[in-house]
Amino acid sequence: MTDLVHADHVTLRYGASEIFSDVSFTIEPHSFTSIVGPNGAGKTQLMRVIIGLVTPSAGVLLRNFTMHQIGYVPQRLYVHPALPVTVREFIQLYITPRGLWRSVALPTFDPKFSIDHLMNKPLGKLSGGQLQRVILATVLSTQPQILFLDEFSSGIDPQGQAELFGYLHRLHEQAGLTIIMISHDLDITSQYADQVLCLNKNLICHGRPRYVFTAENLEKMYGIPLTKLERHHHHD
């Protein structure tokens, strides 16, 4: 099987600041990969390198996909509250670029997204969780082959997260959707991902969550003893 992504000793710098260094891994088609690590570890920038939005400073990254095959859901999208665009118009514009003023039939969205009642609401008036649901539903409506998620579930309540991750898991299992996700949630990663990249400036470890989520690796990644990490995780 040809790798979807092959990274060989990839380093990214901005001026004198090194974002991450000497990172090597592969991502296979139809896999579910989660990138985890503390704030400032370089996770979002690594995702941008994988997508092709940023060129690495050193090393080689080969990708066997085009931009037309991907969907991307950012961690947060700032929308000015006064922006005179409704949810319906946003979806129309995404589906048919430059087609905002044309009548475009909207796809049927799964009830788990809970966005049908939001169609006439201004985009800038949505809560953070509502906006994330709208963006995810819109991106999936174009049936991407590879879905990039940058902590997309922030602002969504736990029950909503469980429903959406269950939905994504079915798309991954049944439709072969490749998912590459940034997450802080080790439980969700352990439950759904078949590969995890543990990043903190360097690639601390990678592989199946059950094998790499050891006390030693977690302490290396977060820089604190596992007991403190567990207390912090349960508190959150």
Image (tube, rainbow, N blue to C red):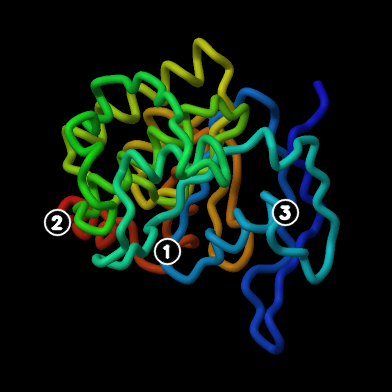
Q: Residue at x 17, y 32 (%)?
A: 117
Q: Which residue of the protein is positioned furthest toward the top in this rendering?
A: 174
Residue 98 percent across, percent down from the top left: 57, 46
Q: Quadrant of residue 188?
A: top left
In the figure, is residue 198 to the left or right of 229? right
User: Mark on residue 38?
Assistant: 1
Tell me which amino acid carries mark 3: Gly
Res. 95 in view: yes
Tell me which amino acid carries mark 2: His
Residue 97 lies, with reference to residue 11, above or below; the image says above
Who is closer to the viewer here, 120 or 233? Answer: 120
Q: Which residue of the protein is positioned furthest toward the bottom in this rendering?
A: 16
Residue 81 lies, with reference to residue 123, above or below; the image says below
According to the picture, the residue beneath numbered tag 3 turns out to be: 52
1 or 2: tag closer to the N-terminus: 1
Residue 60 percent across, percent down from the top left: 85, 56
* Pointers 2 and 3 in contact (C-beta within 8 Å): no
User: Mark on residue 235?
Assistant: 2
